[in-house]
Amino acid sequence: MKQNCSLGKLLLTAVWGILLSGSLSAQNVITITDNQSYIEDFEGNGFSLWTVDTTGGGNWAKITGTLSSVASFSYQNAGDEARLISPVFDMSNVTEVTLNFSYAMLGLYTQDVLEVAYRTSDTSAWQLLGTLSVSDYTNYFEQTYTLPSLTSTYQISFNGRGLGGLFLFVDNVEVASTSSCARPISLSVGDITHTSAQLNWVPTGNETSWTIELNGQETVVSTQPYVMTGLTPQTEYTFRVRANCAADDQSEWSTAITFTTYCDVYVVTDQIPYLDDFESSADFVCWHSEIVSGTDGWVVDPGYLITNNTAFFIWLGEEARLVSRPLDISSVTEPTLTFKRRQPQGASDVDELSVWYRSSSNDNWQLLEYFPLPTEGWETEIVNLPNPSQNYQIAFVGMGYNAEGIYVDDVEVGKRSVGIAENQIATAVVSPNPTTGKAMLETGILEGEASVYDMFGKFVTSARISEGRAEIDLTQCARGVYAVRLNGANASTIIKLVKE
């Protein structure tokens, strides 16, 4: 799985930034050659070489945060625009040039628009290269365009249009000849463990050698991607790379990204459980979010939505897995998972939660329990953990259905407490699914009850389980998604049934 690039300096800038106003007219001409590119990360005085056209009511400014700076678009009214205009580039001596830059955008209901354009002189009209519009809380993106119609009076621009978004940032602008030794782009990190990580990047030339810098230590490699081993658990690393085109010809360093290695194995005993209430930011370091679909994952809500910190997931149409650190539960007597969950009802749906386990990082995930019904308050859940091992992991999987999100808190893995009833997770299959009316349920519960609920948690119907079989009749029910709760003498589970 790939780890999404953290917004890093972009998001910190938004939170801690100090707005710097003003701009100067671009007067310097910057020559682009096969050996000379232009890179602007807005860390120094480079923003002063850019101009801002504010006739549309908006503005661009340099925002400086605790770690770094970006160019930031702001506006007062929906529809306001502003154009950030580069210095003049002399590209008359090169045949092909690319524009590469990073950007980040967020809008809860609507998002702003970023238009990228060029012009061949200050008297010619702007020509559109592309339009970007995305809403993402945790990631930044890289974009590359090939620049057409090269001249000695060339300019590029970023035109922001405010449509209700919360922020729009641009950073790490690079203008480079494709014949030069160009820096790699689109860095990412995948297959992270507590001691290794796969480092990925996209070459922009024909080079076959690269220099990786990881926390200041350089390593020359000839394979891409590259698996870096010997890392320290629970440690943040800053990763960047540059191309080695010849013995005396290296590219500029790429944009840097950060990642954190996973925590080492936590040994759980009958006397020492594993506990996590997410109250400390350090707690969440030992969990990691894996994207199943979409672009967003689990985050810690730092008391904004409810009064205490929780693990939180809410992304329409997306799915993500929150994975624990490895746990050694091999010596625990009857190991159990205890946690609290909250799934508020939306206007017409509820976001779904399921809990999974695997005995090692090489095993497939196995379903423990499924929670499709809403809970306005906190519900405490207790799940037995089968097949204990020395590298056990649990995962909370959230599926967004345009409701009010999923909250998980007060996670505990340890010995089953006295007084907790034995309750196994039953196997169950229902077919056909989807159904147009009736469906047959087959389950490991020999005798029991199958209760059907709609997605508002309202009871719909029930069927008696006899000899492991039951017929569920939704003939008179509306189309939609239903939850079937199976209960037996010492086993239970919940499955989803769709009525078409």
Image (tube, rainbow, N blue to C red):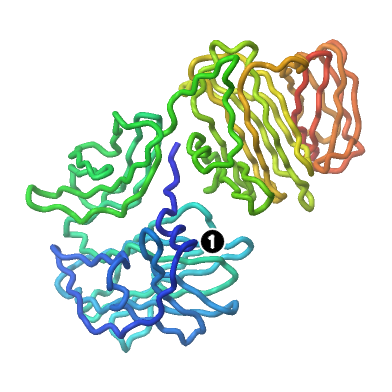
Q: Residues within 10 Å of mark 1 (few under 14, many from 20)?
A: many
- When the figure is inspected, residue 383 is found, relative to residue 185, above or below; the finding is above
Instruction: State the quadrant of the C terminus.
Output: top right
For residue 494, side relative to residue 156 (left or right): right
Task: Inspect the image, locate mark 1, and give the three-letter code of the amino acid beneath it.
Answer: Leu
Q: Please give the name of the residue rendered at 42% of the width and 67% of the height, measured from the top-left corner.
A: 130
Secondary structure state at the residue bearing disc 1: strand
Is residue 289 something that shows in the picture? Answer: no
Q: Please give the name of the residue rendered at 16% of the width and 48% of the height, measured from the top-left corner.
A: 244
Q: Give residue 67's position: percent from left, percent from top.
A: 37, 58
Please state which of residues 477 and 318 is positioned toward the viewer in this rendering: 318
Please state which of residues 34 and 268 is positioned toward the viewer in this rendering: 268
For residue 38, side relative to residue 73 (left or right): left
Q: Please give the name of the residue rendered at 57% of the width and 45% of the height, measured from the top-left corner.
A: 300
Q: Which residue corresponds to mark 1?
A: 106
Q: Give residue 22's position: percent from left, percent from top.
A: 38, 82
Please state which of residues 421 and 398 is positioned toward the viewer in this rendering: 421
List the single residue furthest toward the front: 271
Q: Quadrant of residue 41?
A: bottom left
Q: Give residue 65's position: percent from left, percent from top.
A: 40, 63
Is residue 259 something that shows in the picture? Answer: yes
- When the figure is inspected, residue 92 is found, relative to residue 495, above or below; the finding is below
Q: Quadrant of residue 321?
A: top right
Number of numbered labels in the structure image: 1
Q: Please give the name of the residue rendered at 70% of the width and 43% of the height, measured from the top-left corner.
A: 351
